[in-house]
Image (cartoon, rainbow, N blue to C red):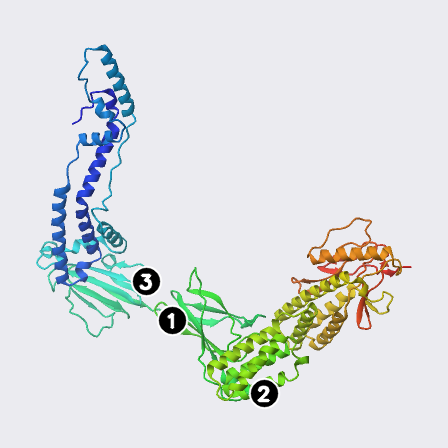
Amino acid sequence: MTDLNRHPALLRLRGPLRLTLAGLWAERITRAFWPLWTVLMALLAALAFDAHNRLGIEVVWAGLVATVLGLVYAGWYAWQQFRKPTEAEAMARLDSRLPGRPIAALQDTQAIGVGDAASQAVWQAHVQRMAAKAAQAKAVEPDLRIAARDPFALRYVALTALVMAVLFGSLWRVTSAGAALPGSGVAAVTGPTWEGWAQPPAYTGKPSLYLNDVAQGDLSLPAGTRLQFRLYGEVGQLTLSETVSGRTEVPPASDPQHDFVAVQSGEIAIAGPNGKTWKIAIIADAPPTIAPDGEITRKGTGEFTQAFKATDDYGVVAGQVTIALDLAAVDRRFGLSVEPEAREPIVLDLPLPVTGDRAEFTETLIDDLSEHPFANLPVTMTYQATDAANQMGAAAPAAVVLPGKRFFDPFAAALIEVRRDLLWSRANAPLSVQYLKAITNRPEALIRNERAYLRLRVALRRLDAEKRDLTAEARDEIAAELWDIALLVEEGDLASALARLQRAQDRLDEAIRNGASPEEIDRLMEEMQQALDEYINQLAREAEQNPDGQMSQNQQGQAMSGDQLQQMLDELQRLMEEGKTAEAAELMEQLREFMENMQVVQGQGGGGQGGPGQQAMRDRMASRMKASNRGSRGSRGSNSNPVRARDKVKVKTRTASNRITAVWRNASKTCSAGWISWASGSCRAMAPRRARPGAGRWTKQAGRWRKPSARCARAT
């Protein structure tokens, strides 16, 4: 043992020395006994997983022999590797981590110059320096890394198996290991005994039952519960009988192992010492139920939405809907009069809740089948749901018209109808060629998109060349091209804002005449408003860039102010809400004619006089249009500015009330130069008018913009 009394500084090293010594013990035990721990952990894991009862006797004996050999080797390895650590070794390790080895220096004695005072002084100074360094000593951590000794990480494999056995197995099964070996004598000492477990299906969420702790009598178990029994002792002392599995081949009642699944109500009895009897009542697992919830709806883009509701005892795991053509409900006219080609039903997976309970839920199926041949045709939709027990429940077939994208442009609608006939049957190819030739014969009044016309001519030539022996692949390629052309016509870009405005008006007019849904009409009205804004901005830019090209300001005509435009749009909205499509279409035609003939020009001040007043008006008009192009409202000018940058016509959609209002913003003292005049098919701005006191301001009452209280009068 190291003598710590040689110097007082060594006494302060007792704490670090003890910790270093404990680390040496942990280090040498780990290095010497890791094989023994690995074998023991693997053995406990196998016993906890009941391997000795599940495997054959030959496998059990082979595992026992391997375990014994492993234990013998682990013991021999520990005997060879382990050396008891000493305090001197701990002191040497502690001293090796300090610079100059001060601990060894403090244990030294002066060999020469003992009687010399100078030598004594040097020695004392040396000892003091070593004591100061020794005072900095800290415990040395042990090196427990044994990766070089265990290159295959067997210790981690055994540890993982043991952890899994503790979590999902039972350490109580270790006590039955001796009974699994013949002639062990365990039964003779403890007498006959038994164990039983009931494991419901995992999807039920119910816990496993240890039947030894369950009192005999009535017992309810879910259908599909797995029952396991182990009988220990001499064969015949304990027997098991049951009527819940429905098995035709029943093993002997005295077998030491019984494993079966409960599928029906019945009785389980263990005869013998400490036996029990249970009357099992099976809780049946009902198949899931599913049904559509509400009517199927279509969005303006062609997507359809259908809500559905599903229920199950323990939860739905999958669902699907099968969409099949309802041939009996199809209007068999025109291209649909021939026999259709056979097509497989559409099968869509239903969305399920990602989180939460799936025992009862409501979800919405959203999909777009506009390009499918069944689009806009009568179909039957059959909903099916599957639970964890692989039981299926189906709803009654629902007869609906499969929603698809609607085309309001006549040319696009004609292309879609030809495409539908081709997909219905290739026998319609010759008739489809005739239709397409008739459409493209004089395209000036029908086809406004040149690129769509050229693509259609290419598709027509191919269809005409292959109409006699048209293959399914070629038919599908031509149908895809017709779809793209129809989209180009319906939603493609146009060369000018006027063409886009006309297009938006045509689509809205067609939607009104065809009785489209309110959602589609709202969307089309918003598109028309956007096209109108862009068209007005372009007219304003043209008026700014070419002010001398406008009409004469003195030309007579009918003037339409902002409130009159508002009245027209309000009337259009009212007619659509009341379902008066004919009157709405007529008013839409008047609005179309007005928009097409509208022209923005600059007004004059002072009764039509030119000169500086006109130039000032042009400057203010230019600044207002620039502010409009930047998408800003513009800031208010000073009181000396007679016409402000915010004085313009703006069409605004208020989605909250689904109303279209035309907001005419006037100056506080002088009416804006943007009055619209309709004369001989063109538009111009009227001369400025001086407002009466209190006139020219819009107010918002009851959620609506109201007209000014006084009208502008002509300047005197």
Q: Is residue 361 above or below residue 457?
A: above
Q: Which is more foreground, mark 1 or mark 2? A: 2
Question: Which residue is depicted at the point 65% across and 63% down?
Answer: 655
Q: Earlier in the sequence, mark 3 or mark 1?
A: 3
CA gap, disc 3 to disc 1? 17 Å
For residue 701, side relative to residue 125 (left or right): right
Q: Is residue 357 above or below residue 77?
A: below
Q: Which residue is mark 3?
A: 202
For residue 203, side relative to residue 342 (left or right): left
How far across and down, in percent of the image, does residue 622 sit? 76, 57
Q: Quadrant of residue 7?
A: top left
Say what amino acid the circle numbered 2 marks: Gln
Question: Which residue is depicted at the point 38% across and 64% down?
Answer: 314
How far across and down, in percent of the image, does residue 311 sit? 43, 67
Say what amino acid the circle numbered 3 marks: Ala
Q: Is residue 413 above or below residue 162?
A: below
CA gap, disc 2 to disc 3? 64 Å
| Depth order, front residue of 587/262 | 587
Q: Which residue is mark 1?
A: 287
Crowdedness of circle 3 by 10 Å Cα count: few (<14), some, many (20+)? few
Secondary structure of the residue carrying numbered label 1: loop
Q: Which residue is mark 2?
A: 434
Secondary structure of the residue carrying numbered label 3: helix
| Depth order, front residue of 400/198 | 400
Question: Which residue is depicted at the point 24% across and 39% down?
Answer: 143
Q: Earlier in the sequence, mark 1 or mark 2?
A: 1
Q: Are marks 3 and 1 in contact (CB under 8 Å)?
A: no
Does residue 696 appear anywhere in the picture? no
Q: Which is more foreground, mark 3 or mark 1? A: 3
Say what amino acid the circle numbered 1 marks: Pro
